[in-house]
Image (cartoon, coloured by chain):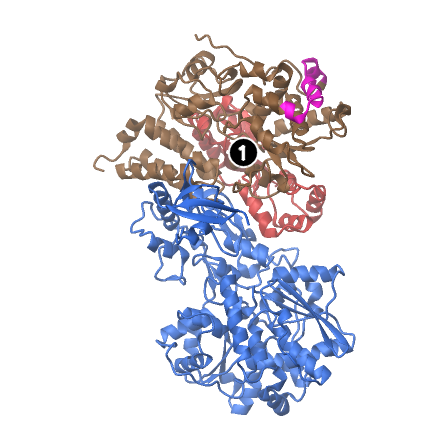
Chain colours: A blue, B brown, C red
Amino acid sequence: METVTAVIDGCKVEVAKGTTILDAAKTVGIKIPTLCYHPDQSIKANCRICVVEVEGVQLLQAACATAVGKDMVIKTNTMAVREARKTVLELILAHHPQDCLQCIRNQNCELQTLAHEYNVRENRFEHIDENLLLDLTSPGVHRDPNKCIKCGRCIEVCERVQTAAVYSKYNRGFKVGVAPVLNLGLGEVACINCGQCVHACPVGAIYENDQHEQVWDAICDPKKHVVCQMAPAIRVALAEEFGLNAGELEMGKIVAALRQIGFDKVFHTNFTADLTIIEEGNELLHRINNGGKLPMITSCSPGWIKYCEHFYPDFLDNLSTCKSPQQMFGALVKTYYAEKASIDPADIYSVSFMPCTAKKFECIRPEMNSSGYQDVDVVLTTRELARMIREAGIDIVNIAPEDFDAPMGMYTGAAVIFGATGGVMEAALRTVYEVVTGKTLQDINFTAVRGMEGIKEATVDLDGLEVKVAVAHTTGNARKLLDAIRAGEKFYHFIEVMACPGGCIGGGGQPYGTTNEIRQKRIDAIYDEDAGLPIRKSHENPAITQLYEEFLKEPLGHKSHELLHTHYTKRSLYPFSKEEK
Amino acid sequence: MSLAKEQRIVLNNYDKINPASIDEYIAQGGYQALKKALTMSSAAIIDELKASGLRGRGGAGFPTWLKWSFTAPIEADQKYIVCNADEGEPGTYKDRLIMDKDPYRLIEALTIAGYTLGATKGYIYVRGEYPQSQQSLNTAITGTKAAGMMGKNILGSGFDFDLEVFSGAFAFVCGEETAIIESIEGKRGEPRIRPPYPGTVGLWGKPTVINNVETLANIPAILNNGGKWFASIGAVKYPGTKIMTLSGDVVNKTFVEVPTDTTLYDIIYGFGGGVTGGDFLAVQVGGNSGGVLPESLLNTPIDFDSMMAAGGSLGTGAVFVINDKRDLLDVVKNMAHFFTEESCGKCTPCREGCQRLYDFMVKVCDGKATVKDLKIANGLARVMNKSALCGLGQAAPTPVQTAIKFFGNKFEEKLLQNS
Amino acid sequence: MVDSYTNVSVDKIIAEFKDVKSGLLPALHAIDEKYKVIPEEALVKLSQVFNIPVSQIYGVATFYAKFAVNQRGKNVIRFCESAPCHIAGAAELVAAFEKQLGIKAGETTLDGKFTLEFCQCVGMCQEAPVFTINQQPYFNVSIEEIPEILARF
């Protein structure tokens, strides 16, 4: 490896050729401030907060964009640098609402942190308030364009990672803004509600539709029987909200906290994740054996579903008709559980805790009312859950753990791994293999479908039946896969797609500022949890067996079709357009 | 009356020939340079340019030979030559004169550039405000093709070259060379981060050289008469001639092409015939990004380095004269406003800073600014100079900065007394 | 009124630039020339033809001052507001036009005939103040001449 040596603030550094000043400075413990920089994105160098002085160069250089040159003498803390940084900060702050106390990103905002670190006590520039309208058109993601600092990170993640390309800059100069086409709302364009722009945003300009007050209202309503479910990706990330590392929070503590908040029943989405595997596994075998449409593609990720409806409507028949675990759960709570517990489903208020902003859209889809009511009443993200726990004053780190309620709180390791990219595939393979071959799996870990690689492929031998599978996370990778299938370059039997990078653990509802590095830690925590569980195959979940015996009767049966399966809607790429309507 | 004389190189054919006629251009010696170039090696042409000392006429003053020498040796399946004809600096119309009155000269120059650089495709990025120049160039391109001097195997040399006129769409920032590239690629005209420089990674990722119209228009004469000849004209370090366009409070609102050692005084009082409507107060040289200079600097020769040393800049060669009956602060406010409209909005210092400098000037003009405001404006300007992403943002504070520097008394008169 | 656009005619204009590598801006110019506006339908068509996200086309169309996404009048009058025109009395000229047409700069007359806009230097500074009507420059116009000039449109 070719290296260069340079001096940063008097410290000698030796780094690989091409290393930026920003990264080189980190190696000697010097933190250069950034705003438009994002570790998972391209270099933009537009905020100019990271400028440094390079000896012999008249202009200040952006540390994020400038490679360390041979024998460069770099200074990160001179008068000129300090003046530039402070001025840039003041300029941004003066054109940004001053409501930090009310802001959803209070104490978790890159701009606020910098203002604190650089001791901005007064602003030399007069405050400008543009009074732009909030965008509340999407059920999942809201925007306050007044807070936008025009860094372009949301544009990049939407365009390059998700290839939904909802955002662009508009106008120029001081009037530049970031918005969907024609300055429409997110709810009016081909936005998939994935919420990855929320993680990209350094400030409070993009955030979830916060509905946690509605849940408090329901809890305080004595007539309501409030039940909740929780996705597998919640536990690993919720820990981060309370200062722990990914996965360090014990599941039982979350259960205890939810009871303390006042939920009448605390269940787990994992229960219906196991159910999904039974239904979806059977659907796959049915398609393979009866010449059905292949590849079959998973349907758990509502961001992916909406993406498919907008961008690849010709693949709608490829989508598994299985509802997502959340919606299966919702349908069963107001039927199976209501019956079992002798509660009028009209009195049940069903709350879903999800790592996902797209789930907020999914639960209000018109077809999601097969119980006769809206199956899931409200979806809260991991962040909103954390807010409720804090509001309730619960010391979740030290609370005594409790168990989930029966029967919909029982789950296997196969359900847990739904939270990570490749997890649904692996869970399905664990079950499908044993169902088809009648043999017990020697090694239940299908590592080929694990990990952060964008597209993963594997071939599984089911006693002579070769099943080709693929796993994609991010809709950008799904696009690549579908394009290859369309072009006839690839054939698969079964594909798992998750809209978010890393799968649900990287979802748009997870703690703010999720990066790929954090995603990897959550994935590790998910597989640790799976490995530690006594039952790791969905078809071995006794509560699921009981559910079929007591209620559903058989996979893909009449009741399943009524409650657990759904259909999809072709959507336009240009939903705003008169012509397309 | 001064002794300074006009010397026309790039405007040699101005009003002498029918701009649409290639025959008339050829009759004036046109296409001799191209013929000569096609017999020379790329290195030899670059050497000739080096000997000439030709430097950019668009504002940055970069040695042309050096720019070419980076790109010429690169092996690539495609390289591009782009002509920057997006002159948008207020008070400037030099490139328009060349494109309207002698388009073949520019085309010949671009063909030579293409040959030297190994670029088989060229674009002339003409500002959208100049439909007539686009038409003139398109006519000339058609004429050149008809005469067999553009297209495949030009004059039997084996060199293929094609040229296209590309219209801008009213964005001053697209005079910045990487913004031009973005614009041709069909994007918002936001300057790119450098490195990589366009010479290695330019249009569609290919090595691309971008030269200003006036710079290129010198090249045929340099090849015909030799680099030494050119180097002997005007200032030693910035040789040749420069077109200066006069506007504002000057008797002759005209243009002149003069050797680069001509002084500002000679241009304003000699060619310009002096100041009208009052006495001399200030002159802004180089367009809206240029400095607002006082009378004491009028003896400065116009060449790049002398202007820089004097605290101004040659820029595009626009000479905008302001008489002493004018409200200078109001004029500077107008200059500051220009950048609020024309900043691309990509980087913070320029996007926010241009607006703040304009707000400051409004406050000054309204008699509401304080000494503190002045200090803040100076600090902001300093930060913009040093940390804006591109040349536009770095130069945007110049009118305000130089006005404060050279006409501080005008500001002081207007500042709130008790501040 | 401006020629009303139809999808067919927008399609036809765009089709001409379909295979041009740098076709987006030329196509926008052609649409602008015909309609003085980039209609929503054109944003969609451009997105389809060039395979560029519609958001990005919106970003481009709003970046360049020549293009507008909101309807303009049939004739666009632009006043240079750069310094040489500014000191030559551009403001008086603008005020006279505003009075004559009963609209402010940035607005369009009710009959859809004229839009008044500001622009920056058009490179005709030898004859300031300058304004253009549909890109045709007018020099040294006295305020008395305005009605006669407008009557030509």
Does residue B105 lie above or below B269 as drawn?
below
Q: Quadrant of residue B153?
A: top right
Residue B31 within the segment the image draws in magenta = yes
Residue A212 visible, this orientation? no
Main structural element of the magenta stretch: helix, strand or loop?
Answer: helix
Residue C35 drawn at (x, y percent)? 63, 41
Residue density around tag 1, few if under 14, some if 14–19, many if 20 or more, within 10 Å? many
B203 relative to A97 in the view: left or right: right
Which residue is tagged 1? B175
Residue A164 drawn at (x, y percent)? 60, 58
A133 relative to B203 in the view: left or right: left
Q: Quadrant of residue B306?
A: top left
Q: Secondary structure at mark 1?
A: helix
Circle 1 chain: B
Q: How many marks?
A: 1
Residue A223 drawn at (x, y percent)? 44, 85
C47 relative to A353 in the view: left or right: right
Q: Amino acid at mark 1?
A: Gly
C12 or B44: nearer the eye? B44
B178 or B170: nearer the eye? B178
Residue A124 drawn at (x, y percent)? 31, 45
Does residue C151 lie above or below A507 as drawn?
above
Does residue A272 lie above or below A549 as drawn?
above
A29 or B140: nearer the eye? A29
Residue pushed farthest left? B418
Residue A486 visible, this orientation? yes
Q: Which residues are magenta?
A: B23-45
Does residue A241 lie above or below C103 as drawn?
below
Residue A294 within the segment the image draws in magenta = no
Classify the position of the C terminus of chain A by image quarter: bottom right
